[in-house]
Amino acid sequence: MTTSNTPTSNTPTGDATATAVDPAVREELARLRDSIDNIDAAVVHMLAERFKATQQVGHLKARHQLPPADPTREARQIERLRALAENAKLDPAFAEKFLNFIIAEVIRHHERIADDTAAPASG
Amino acid sequence: MTTSNTPTSNTPTGDATATAVDPAVREELARLRDSIDNIDAAVVHMLAERFKATQQVGHLKARHQLPPADPTREARQIERLRALAENAKLDPAFAEKFLNFIIAEVIRHHERIADDTAAPASG
């Protein structure tokens, strides 16, 4: 009793969920994806704000010859985020991986800032 | 006029910023780091919520034999997030890397759900 009317199977650019899926399922999937998209938009804006703060940290560190990385601070951040994640029922290992991913990007920024600041200074 | 009383220099677990740094700089750094910590807590809670939604997507896909990955949906998400990032003055390349990082984790979850669901089915 499934619909058997030209199911455009395997079109390379077609939507995998558009063919032969119960409309109720498709609707539920769309509802969940709308929430995911909203969350992603929020997270992107949070990360934009986070990088604004870390850029300021980078300039501060460069101006005062502080090292770009700070292992003690990072260890504390990881411990704290793991605890927060556990509370929120998010895999703490993932939270740690996530923070490391962000910090790697931040350190890249800081090194760039340090390079830019070091060039004309030394006086 | 700086305080000169037993500066615990170079203790292995000491804070790199605690030694020989202008108190005003240290204060500014602490202020920025408090904001970063607040943002991180918010993001961790957003991601917890995001994974709740993707877990539901995973179960839905497993129940209806939909493939764990959906390249068309992912391409659309990446394009959208890059545009949002640009607007928020976040590096679009970083936003894309970030989404790929999250999606990789989600697909791992979906595959695990699909395996769990496939085992007793096939009837």
Image (cartoon, coloured by chain):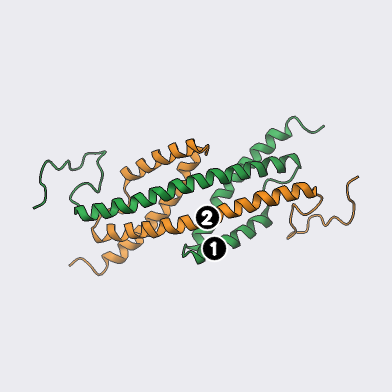
Chain colours: A orange, B green
Image location of residue A116, percent across then percent down: 31, 66
Image location of residue B11, percent across then percent down: 21, 39
CA distance for labels 1 and 2: 10 Å
Relative height, residue B48 to residue B98 (above, below):
above
Figure quadrant of residue B51 = top right
Mark number displayed over residue A42: 2
Q: Chain of mark 2?
A: A
Q: Amino acid at mark 2?
A: Ala
Mark 2 burial class by Cα count in 10 Å: few <14, some 14-19, many 20+: some
Q: Chain of mark 1?
A: B
Relative height, residue B121 to residue A3 (above, below):
above
Image location of residue A120, percent across then percent down: 25, 70
In the picture, which quadrant includes the C terminus of chain B?
top right
Which residue of the protein is positioned furthest toward the top in this rendering? B120
Q: Which residue is mark 1?
A: B84
Q: Secondary structure at mark 2?
A: helix
Horizontal arrangement in the rendering, residue A85 relative to residue B65 (left or right): left
Residue at point 56% right, 65% down? B83
Confirm whether residue B105 shows in the render.
Answer: no
Residue at point 26% right, 44% down? B15
Q: Secondary structure at mark 1?
A: helix
Image location of residue B119, percent across then percent down: 73, 31
| Front residue of this view, candidates B29 and A9 | B29
Q: Amino acid at mark 1?
A: Leu
Figure quadrant of residue B106 = top right
- Disc 1 or disc 2, which is closer to the eye? 2
Relative height, residue B56 to residue A33 (above, below):
above
Judge if badges 1 and 2 mark residues of a common chain.
no
